[in-house]
Amino acid sequence: MAVAADVGELRRLARRRTPRMVFDYVDGAAEGERSMARAVRAFDRVEFAPHVLRDVAEAPTSVEVLGRRVAMPVVLAPTGFTRMMHRGGERAVARAAERAGVPYTLSTMGTTTAGDVAAAAPGGWNWFQLYVVRDRARNLERLALAEAAGMDVLVVTVDVPVAGRGCGTCGTA
Ligand SMILES: Cc1cc2nc3c(=O)[nH]c(=O)nc-3n(C[C@H](O)[C@H](O)[C@H](O)COP(=O)(O)O)c2cc1C
């Protein structure tokens, strides 16, 4: 981590160290990967507007999100199968979010239970993401587990009515 100057270098390190299938799950996108390329182009266009010759002794980044203060305007988005990428998995990401003072979102496709995430990061603000499936009892069961673990924000993913090819593992079953 310390030798990586930017995300591109982290990606190159990960590619060297990670099994191909796992790397592709994280790095790849559906079909021709056009929407991902568009997202990358959109981020490339973002530029910080520099304000020079100002007092920057204090540069607070904290903002209010859903009525609570967080350290910066960042939320860690849900990722499925996180333990496939690293044995620390969801617990490690939730702990990092707790340390950074930002919310962490556990995925429906997570590989750690809501209870275990909450136990790993008890001082963190842990959210839960739901893929709504046809089996309503299953949805309610997942929500009950998240709620029992103290997760009080629900993220509903609505843009996966069908899984794109190349995205076989992000299905909603
Ligand atoms: C490896 C990986 C796994 C993901 N798994 C989920 C998931 O389980 N549930 C979900 O709602 N979104 C999932 N997403 C989508 C992310 O939460 C996020 O919305 C998306 O990557 C867009 O944010 P980005 O532009 O910062 O990557 C996943 C994304 C990646 C890259």
Image (cartoon, grey):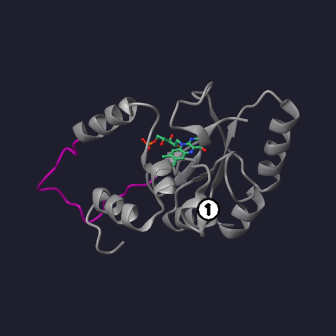
Q: In the rendered image, which quarter is residue 46 located in?
A: top left
Q: What span is in magenta?
A: 47-62
Please tell me whether residue 17 is drawn above or below residue 137 in the rendered image.
below
Q: In the rendered image, which quarter is residue 108 located in?
A: top right
Residue under label 1: 83
Which one is nearer the viewer's eye here, 74 or 35?
Answer: 35
SS majority, magenta: loop
Circle count: 1
Which one is nearer the viewer's eye here, 48 or 20?
Answer: 20
- Let me know if residue 31 appears in the view: yes
Residue at the (52%, 61%) spot, across then down = 101
Q: Position of residue 106 (x, y in %)?
A: 64, 51
Residue at the (50%, 37%) spot, across then down = 166
Residue found at the very far top of the displayed protein: 161
Residue found at the very far left of the displayed protein: 53
Q: Position of residue 138 (x, y in %)?
A: 84, 38
- Label 1 crowding class (10 Å Cα cut-off): few <14, some 14-19, many 20+? some
Residue at the (74%, 56%) spot, across then down = 114
Please tell me whether residue 90 is drawn above or below residue 120 in the rendered image.
above
Residue found at the very far bottom of the displayed protein: 2
- Let me know if residue 74 appears in the view: no
